[in-house]
Amino acid sequence: MQKSKNILIAPLNWGLGHATRCIPIIDAVLENGDIPIIASDGQALHLLKKEYATATFIELPSYDIEYAKEGENLKLKMLKDSPKIWKAIRNEHKVLHEIIHEYKIDGIISDNRLGLYSNLIPSVIITHQLQVLSGSTTWLSTQLHLHYIKKYDYCWIPDIDEVENLTGKLSHNDDYEIEKVYLGPLSRFKKTGSYQKKYDLMVLLSGPEPQRSILEKKLIEELKRYSGQVLFISGKIEEEQKVTKKGHITFYNYLSTSGLQKALDRSELILSRSGYTTIMDLQKLGKKAFFIPTPGQFEQEYLAQLLEQKNIVPQASQSDFKIEMLDRVDDYRGLSSIQSSMTSISSILKATFSSVNENSDPIPNSLST
């Protein structure tokens, strides 16, 4: 009988999207009879602890990413914060060697954490950003990202390698040094096919502060003019789940995967950020949506504009949004118009880590830099 492998799975703590799209990866590791060792920090780690209570968890150095209060200042703030981000990348790379030894790690899957590469065991990075949009500095930000991607054995891309994809130009480039594997869109949800509608609108918030709170406050004010039943998910991962009802709005601080699946099934329209994980989830479920990209977040703005230009989903800026704009949704094709399927993650996992030699010599006391 083949020995179980210990697979380190480490999502970036930047909003909740990186953590939630790792859920189908973790499930596939378990399906293969292997053992997921989950590593992250902050809200991402907290969320996964709620999903996998009996798993082994490791807290990694925090990138400590926070958005600017004004969207136009985001790039300046990211440049200002870059030294502490590079320091966190170096620190997580330093502690990786200890983690490999202590937990007998056989393989690494990093979702956008740039320091978890190794020359001792197979390492994978999950990213859809083979082009990193940053306005006038896009070439530089892309090259910096590719520099780290090339340190990994494989780059898993959660999209399809076709023109009619979800990410547009983000997930494509001509760099042949990168071993690319297109997974298809990743989602923790399953399309049930039928449901009984309970909510006319579901507000689904996520993302770093302070922009999450700024949008929350604006939408609560806008929803005073909305007559339908609303489910409002604040996206705050706290110790206890809280639910309150105020008039036509039911508020939750967060929902587990199973709870969120039911909520999405019972909601007719979804109002959310245009984060890529959210787009993948709503495409999987075939939901109608309206997007409000995070101000100054070039990728979210690009994705929202791309889907609007393709007549798939309408969008508006945070400053311009009015609740009456939701009436535009019926004029768009919807995310279900994009057909795609997810590759068998279990098979990819087996192929990626099949070369791990169960009887190999002890890992040397050195790690690549």
Image: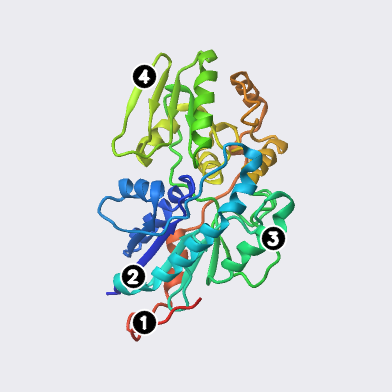
User: In this orientation, does residue 154 appear?
Assistant: yes
Query: Which badge, 3 or 1, comes first in the chain's sequence?
Result: 3
- What's the distance in space between the residues labelled 2 and 3, CA to CA? 38 Å
Give the class, few, some or many, for how many residues have Cα within 10 Å of label 2's Cα (few <14, many ≥20).
Answer: many
The secondary structure type at the circle numbered 4 is strand
Residue drawn at point x = 66 percent, y = 26 percent: 320
The secondary structure type at the circle numbered 1 is loop
Q: Which mark is residue 5?
A: 2
- What's the distance in space between the residues labelled 2 and 4, CA to CA? 46 Å
Depth check, mark 3 against mark 4: the one in front is: 3
Q: Which mark is residue 245?
A: 4
Query: Which badge, 4 or 1, comes first in the chain's sequence?
Result: 4
The residue under label 4 is which amino acid type? Lys
The residue under label 3 is which amino acid type? Leu
Q: Position of residue 167 (x, y in %)?
A: 63, 49
Residue most extreme to the right:
136
- The residue indicated by pointer 3 is 140
The N terminus sits in image quarter: bottom left
The residue under label 1 is which amino acid type? Ile
- What's the distance in space between the residues labelled 3 and 1, CA to CA? 36 Å
- The residue indicated by pointer 1 is 363
* Circles 2 and 3 in contact, beta carbons < 8 Å: no
